[in-house]
Image: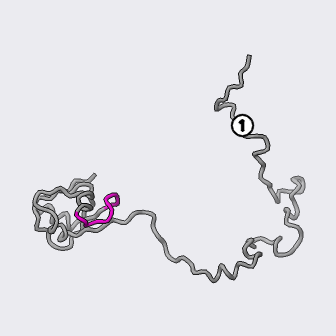
């Protein structure tokens, strides 16, 4: 006795819902050879003619301003200079993107943060967690007894 139980191995699309793609230009035996369903001569039969050009929209497309340049999908580092840390943090503070966001030095705690070595660090023994640090900044931090923990 067979049951018509639905399972992954007997799933099929509805009848008529799948239609084969028309393969043109594959010889006369295919039924779409010689002119490849384009008819004879004329602009529409030639290659490289878009539908927009045939509809008279090419002039409009050429008049539109182009988007120039390149925008990287990778997020940019949010920069924080050492002299800015002097105002907001005391000796022995732990600095992470969350603490920098809390004091308003960065705009988003989820994005990458990099500490740059501009200015002089007067605060002692700072601990940096989940933050990128430039070479110059790292030298100043370690000179003041701080440490950088990379996560």
Residue lying at 89% horizontally and 70% vertically, measured from the top left: 40
Q: Position of residue 117 (x, y in %)?
A: 21, 70
Q: Give, as a single range, the part of the protein colored magenta.
A: 103-112
Extreme residue toward the top, this view:
1
- Seen in the picture, residue 16 relative to 59 is either above or below; the reply is above
x%, y% of residue 92?
11, 57
Q: In the displayed structure, does residue 37 sit left or right of residue 4?
A: right
| Residue 109 placement, left or right of 9 | left
Asked if residue 110 is among those painted magenta in the image, a careful observer would answer: yes
Q: Quadrant of residue 57?
A: bottom right
- Give the percent coordinates (x, y) of residue 143: 11, 63
Where is residue 138 shown, x and y percent of the image? 19, 63
**In the displayed structure image, the side of residue 146 where residue 39 appears, left or right:** right
Residues 137 and 67: in front is 67
Number of marks present in the image shown: 1
Per the picture, the main secondary structure of the magenta-coloured stretch is loop
Residue at 27% across, 61% down: 101
SS label for mark 1: loop
Which residue is found at the position 27% from the left and 55% from the top? 130
Q: Which residue is mark 1?
A: 12
Residue 113, relative to residue 65: is it above or below?
Answer: above
The quadrant the N terminus occupies is: top right
Residue pictured at 78% horizontal, 49% vertical: 20
Between 129 and 101, the one nearer to me in the picture: 101
Dot 1 surroundings within 10 Å: few (below 14), some, or many (20 or more)? few
Which color scheme does this rendered protein use?
Answer: one colour
25 vs 132, left or right, is right
Does 106 appear in magenta? yes
Q: Dividing the picture into quarters, in which one does residue 8 lie?
A: top right
């Amino acid at each position: 006795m067979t049951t018509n139980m639905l399972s992954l191995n007997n799933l099929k699309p509805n009848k008529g819902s799948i239609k084969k793609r028309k393969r043109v230009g594959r010889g006369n035996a295919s039924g779409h050879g010689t002119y490849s369903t384009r008819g004879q001569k004329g602009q529409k039969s030639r290659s490289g003619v878009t539908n927009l050009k045939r509809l008279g929209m090419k002039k409009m497309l050429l008049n539109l301003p182009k988007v120039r340049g390149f925008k990287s999908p990778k997020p940019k580092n949010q920069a924080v200079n050492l002299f800015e840390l002097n105002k907001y943090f005391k000796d022995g503070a732990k600095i992470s993107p969350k603490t920098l966001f809390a004091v308003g030095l960065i705009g988003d705690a989820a994005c990458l943060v990099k500490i740059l070595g501009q200015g002089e660090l007067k605060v002692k023994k700072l601990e940096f967690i989940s933050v990128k640090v430039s070479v110059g900044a790292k030298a100043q931090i370690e000179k003041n007894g701080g440490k950088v923990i990379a996560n």
